[in-house]
């Protein structure tokens, strides 16, 4: 995989099932659009029930022998994956930038972060443990083992396709689970490139499979199969709800990382320049298409006007362009026409409901691409759709508050519960927020972005279970308690 020019050849992918790259004769293909150019850059199989069945049978067959290997041996494969990702770093980052209109620096960060993620979980091989529990009886040992849950179906979104793939592959394989991964049809390219690389590893057949197809077809086939022991989805609330329904028949465990509507609270005592930088970064990174980033803003009334001016100025300075432009832009196109239309229609409805654009507020007319201007909306109310529903674009509705109690109540008044943040220089404000915000994460005086050793888990409709760190690893393990009398 290597190229010099910006214009790339059309790429065609195969499924990776039971250790082999395979094609099904006559199978229809999904076309993948480069959002910056509007051209079709790749095609990948439109897989269905047969592909799910074959991949799951392979994963099922391979699981016991895989779990019988030592965790260190399994971790060694993750290290090989990290090495592969680093070896192909440049090509993968460019491909990621191409398939998603992601800025090159962010694409590199995703590829590098993915390699680190494989290494990070490889390091857990000698760290996770069971427990010895005190018995009520003499001459008895109670041992709690942590054993792999079995076959994992990993269903991924388009926004961080490569990293989220690793977020599911690394803990699966390390714990002795086998996995079938389904990337999003919107952005399957880097993941399927990785599948080709995995095909060259000496990984036992069936341990890791990659199949492509639609959510309501292939995704449902995976989540309703009795061969699956856990479905892990990163995606929308709607897909999560469908997966809960589909997995109910077999009482299959689900781990769901879903949407967010992250509040940012800016207190009058905050370092306002820091807050402007943090909020701008949080709302414009990857064109606002990030689950954990700032989706609504609450500013203390005494500084509201001053802060809105500063933030609007920063938003207006955001440089838009294509990933391969030089110098690199701050923000690129939205992923596709559908997302642009969704953002635009939400802003139009907000305006009709009384909101006013302080800056931005409309799509940008460019020859190609789906650009939306970084937008700050004033005159918003808590009951507006734009304040309550995930936009997933560079649009930030702003509201004001008088007391911190009020701000915390407004922030918590939300069906999502993924992340939240506060900018303040007062310890009491920090502690009140950390103790009372009902979200999986709270960031203080910084942009929203989690660390791989933390635990990324949403409250309420933002999910069930979570990923990363020790607690993320535990999702892939089930307990087995042995009572041994002697
Ligand atoms: P999506 O729900 O449309 O798709 C996600 C995946 O689910 C895709 O692979 C899709 O094919 C599959 N899918 C869709 N319907 C399905 C069904 N009925 N059964 C099984 N699988 C199905 O989401 P998206 O548009 O790819 O991603 C954006 C969403 O993901 C946003 O809501 C965002 O907040 C969320 N997200 C959350 C996190 C997190 O960590 N919480 C991270 C990234 C994205």
Image: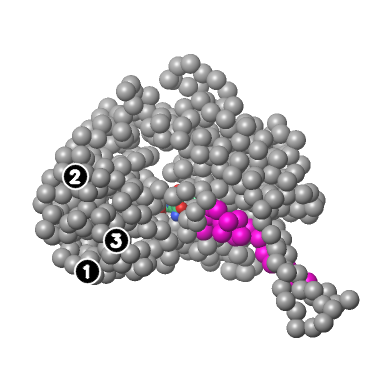
Q: Which residues are magenta?
A: 466-482
Q: Which mark is residue 21?
A: none
Task: Based on the picture, tell me whether residue 58 belongs to the magenta stretch.
Answer: no
- Quadrant of the frame with the C terminus: bottom right
Nearer the N terminus, badge 2 or badge 1? 2
In-image side of 160 versus 359 (left or right): right
N-terminal label among 2 and 3: 2
Q: Position of residue 422 (x, y in %)?
A: 29, 57
Please report the residue visible at 73 percent of the width from the left and 46 percent of the height from the top: 72
> Is the residue marked by circle 2 packed among few (<14), some (14-19), or many (20+) residues within 10 Å?
many
Q: Which residue is mark 2?
A: 311
Give the secondary structure at mark 2. Answer: helix
Tell which of 99 and 40 is nearer to you: 99
User: For mark 1, what is the residue?
Assistant: 406
Contact check, label 2 and label 3, Cβ < 8 Å: no
Residues at discs 2 and 1 in contact (Cβ within 8 Å): no
| Nearer the camera: disc 3 or disc 1 | 3
């Amino acid at each position: 995989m290597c190229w010099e020019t910006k214009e790339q050849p059309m790429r065609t992918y195969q499924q990776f099932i039971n250790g082999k790259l395979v094609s099904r004769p006559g199978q229809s293909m999904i076309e993948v659009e480069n959002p910056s150019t509007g051209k079709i850059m790749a095609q990948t199989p439109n897989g269905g029930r047969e592909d799910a069945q074959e991949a799951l049978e392979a994963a099922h067959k391979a699981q016991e022998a895989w779990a019988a290997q030592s965790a260190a041996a399994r971790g060694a494969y993750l290290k090989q994956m990290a090495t592969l990702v680093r070896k192909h770093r440049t090509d993968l980052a460019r491909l990621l930038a191409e398939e998603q209109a992601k800025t090159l620096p962010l694409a590199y960060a995703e590829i590098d972060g993915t390699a680190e993620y494989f290494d990070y979980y490889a390091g857990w091989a000698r760290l996770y443990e069971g427990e010895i529990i005190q018995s009520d009886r003499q001459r008895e040992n109670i041992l709690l083992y942590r054993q792999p849950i079995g076959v994992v179906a990993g269903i991924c979104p388009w926004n961080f396709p490569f990293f989220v793939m690793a977020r599911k592959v690394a803990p699966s394989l390390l714990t002795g689970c086998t996995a079938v991964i389904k990337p999003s049809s919107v952005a399957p390219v880097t993941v399927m490139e990785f599948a080709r690389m995995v095909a060259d590893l000496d990984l036992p057949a069936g341990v890791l499979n990659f199949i492509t197809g639609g959510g309501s077809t292939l995704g449902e086939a995976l989540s309703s199969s009795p061969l699956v022991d856990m479905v892990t989805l990163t995606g929308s609330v709607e897909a999560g709800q469908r997966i809960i329904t589909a997995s109910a028949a077999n009482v299959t465990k689900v781990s769901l990382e879903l949407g967010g509507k992250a509040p940012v609270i800016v207190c009058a005592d905050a370092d306002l320049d820091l807050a402007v930088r943090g909020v701008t970064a949080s709302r414009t990174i990857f064109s606002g298409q990030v689950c954990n980033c700032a989706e609504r803003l609450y500013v203390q009334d005494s500084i509201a006007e001053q802060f809105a001016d500063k933030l609007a100025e920063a938003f207006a300075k955001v440089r838009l362009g294509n990933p391969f432009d030089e110098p690199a832009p701050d923000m690129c196109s939205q992923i596709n026409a559908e997302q642009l239309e969704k953002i635009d229609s939400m802003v139009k409805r907000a305006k009709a409901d009384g909101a006013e654009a302080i800056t931005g507020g409309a799509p940008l007319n460019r020859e190609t691409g789906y650009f939306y201007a970084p937008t700050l909306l004033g005159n918003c109310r808590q009951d507006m759709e734009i304040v309550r529903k995930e936009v997933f674009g560079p649009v930030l509705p702003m509201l004001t508050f008088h007391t911190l109690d009020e701000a915390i109540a407004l922030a918590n008044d939300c069906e999502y519960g993924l992340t939240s943040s506060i900018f303040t220089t007062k310890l009491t404000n920090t502690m009140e927020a950390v103790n009372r915000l009902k979200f999986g994460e709270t960031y203080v005086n910084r942009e929203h972005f989690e660390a791989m050793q933390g635990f990324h888990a949403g409250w309420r409709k933002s999910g069930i279970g979570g990923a990363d760190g020790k607690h993320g690893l535990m999702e892939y393990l089930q307990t087995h308690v042995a009572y041994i009398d002697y």
